[in-house]
Amino acid sequence: MAITLCVVFILVAASIHDCDGVLRFASYYKDHMVLQKSPERAVVWGYGSEGAQVTFTLSGQKQQNISQATVTNGTWRVTLDPVEAGGPYNVTAAVQNITAVLTDVLFGDVWLCGGQSNMLFKVSGIFNTSEELKRAAHYPHVRTFMASLKKSETEQTDLIGVQIPWSVQPANLAGFSAVCWLFGRNLFDKLQYPIGLVESGWGNTPIEAWSSARALQQCGLESKSRKHYRSPQENSVLWNAMIHPLLNMTIKGAIWYQGEANYIYHQKKYNCSFPAMIDDWRMAFHQGSGGQTAPDFPFGFVQVCYFE
Ligand SMILES: *[C@@H]1O[C@H](CO)[C@@H](O)[C@H](O)[C@H]1NC(C)=O
Ligand SMILES: *[C@@H]1O[C@H](CO)[C@@H](O)[C@H](O)[C@H]1NC(C)=O
Ligand SMILES: *[C@@H]1O[C@H](CO)[C@@H](O)[C@H](O)[C@H]1NC(C)=O
Ligand SMILES: *[C@@H]1O[C@H](CO)[C@@H](O)[C@H](O)[C@H]1NC(C)=O
Ligand SMILES: *[C@@H]1O[C@H](CO)[C@@H](O)[C@H](O)[C@H]1NC(C)=O
Ligand SMILES: *[C@@H]1O[C@H](CO)[C@@H](O)[C@H](O)[C@H]1NC(C)=O
Ligand SMILES: *[C@@H]1O[C@H](CO)[C@@H](O)[C@H](O)[C@H]1NC(C)=O
């Protein structure tokens, strides 16, 4: 009898919470995530009822009561005080008695991994996959997240979907980017503090798809695109859906593995379009994070050999 009552209570509580839908974090702020450590300050944002005052608390090794934020145009946003590497922490957002909580949050360096199929190539496809997956259990502080492959004709505020939620290894690692994972694992070996890896890439896509209209304009590429608008190869469609939504998150840097799709497409412009995209991402992440992401953040890339 007691068990039955308890179950009913939980269901009711859950449905109240869902129906309200009034207080939640943006799609890529979830349990097990990594937020950027000090000296930068992590930016966190989400949704709420118009005008509500949201109060934030960070609990863990250190406690922080973060100043309130007001919901404007359906969203709230807060910049945390700098937090040294470590964790776990809980980040709680509260409006009166309604709360939204991120649990098991670590602070470390957050890296974005972008590009086409070579970046998408999965851990399940590399040499010694099973050993690599077993070994990954020794890296519970390298956390992984992957955005869904989505395109949009307009700049999106949030991701349209999440392919792999923030994960503690080895959960969900087989389907994650091998290059991104090995990069993060090597960083952890050197740095010995948490690393957050955000994969946002799509196979067979040209740089134009990942570039804002601003960046394309720099290289005279802003004119009408080459394919049907439904294609992920269209100008700016992946910038709009898979990069723009992430601009508000504080990141340490980015790595990029792309170029093949441009060997037959605007190849001669790549010497302009690639540096223009890097400049534009740096500027946009700096602005989106309210100055927290460095305006000259490290941008690592694989040089694909020349082809004519
Ligand atoms: C975070 O919240 C979870 C679930 O409520 C709780 O079990 C855990 O003790 C909390 N951790 C911290 C560091 O507050
Ligand atoms: C945070 O606020 C709570 C409730 O007002 C208070 O009990 C606690 O001492 C505060 N913690 C810090 C670190 O200021
Ligand atoms: C809210 O949205 C309106 C209409 O789109 C816009 O004019 C206003 O600047 C926005 N306010 C903020 C604080 O972003
Ligand atoms: C929050 O408090 C209000 C009024 O005190 C109450 O009506 C409501 O049911 C409470 N909501 C939750 C989720 O507890
Ligand atoms: C795969 O594992 C074997 C045995 O541990 C090792 O000899 C080999 O170098 C590994 N291959 C790669 C590509 O790491
Ligand atoms: C890019 O390469 C073309 C030749 O393919 C050259 O004319 C142009 O000056 C180069 N631009 C830059 C910025 O290096
Ligand atoms: C995210 O950053 C963009 C670009 O600076 C800004 O227009 C937008 O309002 C920000 N979103 C939130 C929720 O702060």
Image (tube, rainbow, N blue to C red):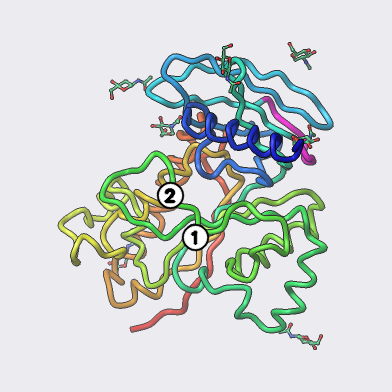
Q: Residue 98, how many percent across, how many down?
A: 59, 22
- What residue does disc 1 label? 114
**Label 2 beta carbon less than 8 Å to ligand 7:** no
**Residue at (49%, 57%) from the top-left corner?**
200
Please give the label number shown on residue 46.
none
Residue 292 among those drawn in magenta: no
**Residue at (56%, 46%) from the top-left corner?**
297
Q: Bounds of the magenta span?
A: 81-89
Q: Residue 27, how many percent across, how many down?
A: 50, 43
Is residue 266 found left or right of 66 in the rendered image? left
Label 1 or label 2, whichever comes before in sequence order:
1
Quadrant (top left/top right/bottom left/bottom right) for the C terminus? bottom left
Label 2: which secondary element: helix
Q: Residue 64, how many percent across, how many down?
A: 74, 22
Q: Residue 172, how many percent across, how many down?
A: 64, 64
Q: Residues within 10 Å of mark 2 (few under 14, many from 20)?
A: many
Question: In the image shown, does 306 or 141 lie closer to the viewer?
Answer: 141
Ligand 1 found in image quarter: top right
**Residue at (47%, 75%) from the top-left corner?**
304
User: What amino acid is at disc 2?
Assistant: Ile
Please give the label number shown on residue 243.
2
User: What amino acid is at disc 1?
Assistant: Gly
Label 1: which secondary element: strand
- Distance, label 1 to label 2, CA atoms, is 9 Å
Q: Number of marks in the image?
A: 2
Residue contact at pointers 1 and 2, CB within 8 angstroms:
yes
